[in-house]
Image: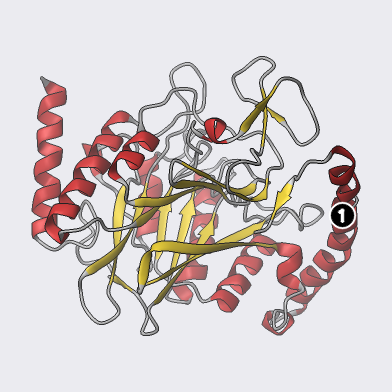
Amino acid sequence: MKKSVKLISLFLVIVLLALSGSTAAYGAAGKKSLHFNADGKFRIMHVTDTHLNDDNAADTLRLIGMACDKEKPDLVVITGDNVSTDTRESIKNLTNRLMSIFDDRNIPTAVTFGNHDSENGCYTREELMALYNAFPCSVSVDEGSLLTGCGTYRLAILGSRDSEVKFNVWVFDSGDYDDEGHYANVAEDQVTWYKLDSALLEVLAGRKIYSVAFQHIIVPEIYEALEPVKTHVPYSYKRIYSDGEYYRFDPNKTNYGCLHEMPCPGYYNHGQFDAMVERGDVLGIFTGHDHTNAFGVKYKGIDIVNSLSTRYNGDAFSTQYGYRIIEIDEKDTSKYTTRVVHWYDFVNTDGVAALAKDSAAKRMLNDIRFKGAFQKLGMNLGVFFVQLFGRTVKYPD
């Protein structure tokens, strides 16, 4: 009975919000509305797994700020594992420093959480969301007790010349861990919310409104989209929560980017991906969590996409960490383009050097160029093994 009452209440809330013209689910009225630009384009920057701490924060935040100045995103989506310290004071300080980057540039910013954000108990997810929502640039929503977790909501992208909803961004809190200690996943009530809201939007608009989705933990269907192999062969990775199962890119599917480590979805599956296939409005699901994976695989008409960790460690991984850009054109919202930018490639891009405003920033860029050159050389040696084993490990971005 309680479950039925909750679903009815959920449906009524969605109906009321839709009829009132709210541009996002659950109390987003009054937040800055999002529109396609005058040229009909909309650019999203995906930032994830910054894992900010006292050692990496300065360089990581400098790089993110410079990336914003170069890319000029219309929306930043942050998908969790944002701060990795263990005192309330340091978590608040680093959160404020992160959000100040976007607030100073007046960039609307949407946040949800990962498995590490609240695991140390310093802040609940609701308390963390309050820290982010203290900044005027935040378009994030705390949906209260209506749904599992905190940070599951919808953002509408309105037309460049009107207030008609042309595109949607779904944001999901994919949780942290289940009762058995496995990684969590989007819960059943969140899936029901998505299905109800998506169906209602279609009725009100008279058509499906295409969208992309963001969350921290990748969907379990990633392993259905990869190719199983019998033994551990080159460029394959062991499946999480399994014994002796290995997977790699399936050459018969559309792939792009690099698979550098084992994808780590939740253990249980509550039907999120199947619901999106059924509804037919989600073009791609963008996740973080697996730090060096920067790939996309098309499966059942939906792109399952992983983005790089956006942190910079100072001494490694300039060729494997970075950010992702997603661009939508108002003229045809049934598709999007995306690209990954590694920090090493970013600092060697024309115009980036001019963004370094002080000696510390210039030193950082030089460090990345120098150390990244050696990392790049090592990665390029892998071409020999690709040819030797006849497998493609990297698809065009």
Q: Is residue 231 left or right of residue 154?
A: right
Q: Is residue 273 left or right of residue 13?
A: right
Image quadrant assignment for residue 365: bottom right
Asked if 41 appears above or below 112 in the picture, the reply is: below
Label 1 environment density (alpha carbons within 10 Å; few <14, some 14–19, many ≥20): few
Asked if 288 appears above or below 120 in the picture, the reply is: below
Percent from the top left, x then y, of residue 296? Answer: 57, 49
Residue at left 25%, top 82%? 161
Q: Secondary structure at mark 1?
A: helix
> Which quarter shows the N terminus?
top left
Residue at left 21%, top 38%? 146
Percent from the top left, x then y, of residue 392? Answer: 75, 45
Tell which of 344 and 94 is nearer to you. Answer: 344
Percent from the top left, x then y, of residue 11? Answer: 12, 41
Residue at left 29%, top 37%? 190
> Which quarter shows the C terminus?
bottom right
Disc 1 marks a residue whose amino acid type is Asn
Image quadrant assignment for residue 69: bottom right
Percent from the top left, x then y, of residue 293? Answer: 65, 45
Asked if 39 appears above or below 314 in the picture, the reply is: below
Tell which of 374 and 255 is nearer to you. Answer: 255
Q: Is residue 346 left or right of residue 299?
A: right
Residue at left 48%, top 72%? 73
Residue at mark 1:
380
Q: Is residue 336 left or right of residue 28?
A: right
